[in-house]
Image: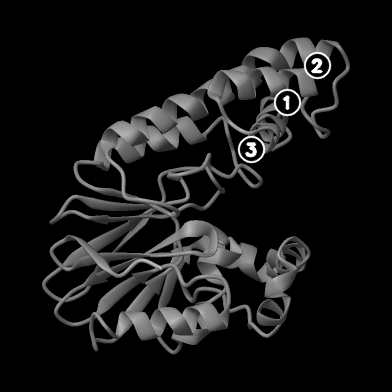
Amino acid sequence: MHPWREVAAGIFIRRYPFLDQTIGAIVGSERALVIDTRATVVQARELIEDLRQLTRLPWVVTNTHVHFDHAFGNSAFRPCEIWSHAGCADALRRHGPAQRENVVRWVPDLADELNRTPLDPPDRTFEDSVELDLGDRVVELRHLGRGHTDHDVIVHSADTGVLFAGDLVEHGAPPGFEDSFPLDWPGTLGMLLDLADGVVVPGHGEPVTRDFVESQLTEVAFLAETARRTWPELRDAGHDPRGHAPHPLVEETARHLGWPIEPVHAALGRGLAQAAGNL
């Protein structure tokens, strides 16, 4: 586990070994904003102990999106406000139990912790943007468009230029596409770049620069264009866009990007479904 690192005045990150997740904390004069709450109540309580190394101020929380490693720790932070896009709160209510079952199958060693973790949806939601006053510091939460999910939120500190990107940007591994909208993702990253005049903190891995985000945008745009370009021919050949992307196409695209098969498989499956109008 890495210690807290101050990436700008009063803005801290800490990386945790599980999924190499990067948690953020922005400290004002009256309260601190905690960015994501980890995967279980046990992990969230560990985060709370670590946060108390930084500040004794009360906190407010935001979830960048609904995935378990970003939102399942919410209940440990109550009774504070928890902010998210409206779609995140709705998705946690509707799909949280099924997501937990899937993760238990994927990570059986975490089963006991997950099954003892209450699902606690955010109670403060917005559609486009909201400003949070932390005391002598205002931060903005914004939904820029669909990408990793349909409700991704970025956190922007205008006074320092630091931007927390959630899983719209990922360092150290390809992004996750299981719930993604690949045809929209490049445009969303383009809007993110319009705000990226300082450090960009991904949901996993090391803080990155604008150049890194531009490189990842190029990769995601290649996946999106591949889905758009190949869909008419696949449609005419009778391909069912609700099924898997053709394996030869996945292999060729993975070789071009230098990525593992799995994320390309998910990206092209979702991209073809979008191109067919099924997402």
In the rendered image of this protein, does residue 262 appear above or below residue 204? above
| C-alpha span from label 2 to label 1 | 8 Å
Element marked by disc 1: loop
Image position of 142 (left or right of 97) = left
- The three-letter code of the residue at mark 3 reads Pro
- Which residue bears the numbered disc 3? 263
- Which residue bears the numbered disc 2? 235
Residue for point 43% across, 32% down: 216
In the rendered image of this protein, does residue 52 appear above or below residue 149? below
In the rendered image of this protein, does residue 49 appear above or below residue 142? below
The label shown at residue 26 is none
| C-alpha span from label 3 to label 1 | 20 Å
Callout 2–callout 1 Cβ contact below 8 Å: yes
Residue for point 63% across, 78% down: 119
Q: Nearer the viewer, residue 8 or 197?
A: 8
- Which residue bears the numbered disc 1? 276
| Residue 38 % position (x, y) | 50, 70
Mark 2 burial class by Cα count in 10 Å: few <14, some 14-19, many 20+: few
Image position of 264 (left or right of 49) = right
| N-terminal label among 3 and 1 | 3
Mark 2 or 3: in front is 3
| Residue 247 % position (x, y) | 78, 24
Element marked by disc 3: helix
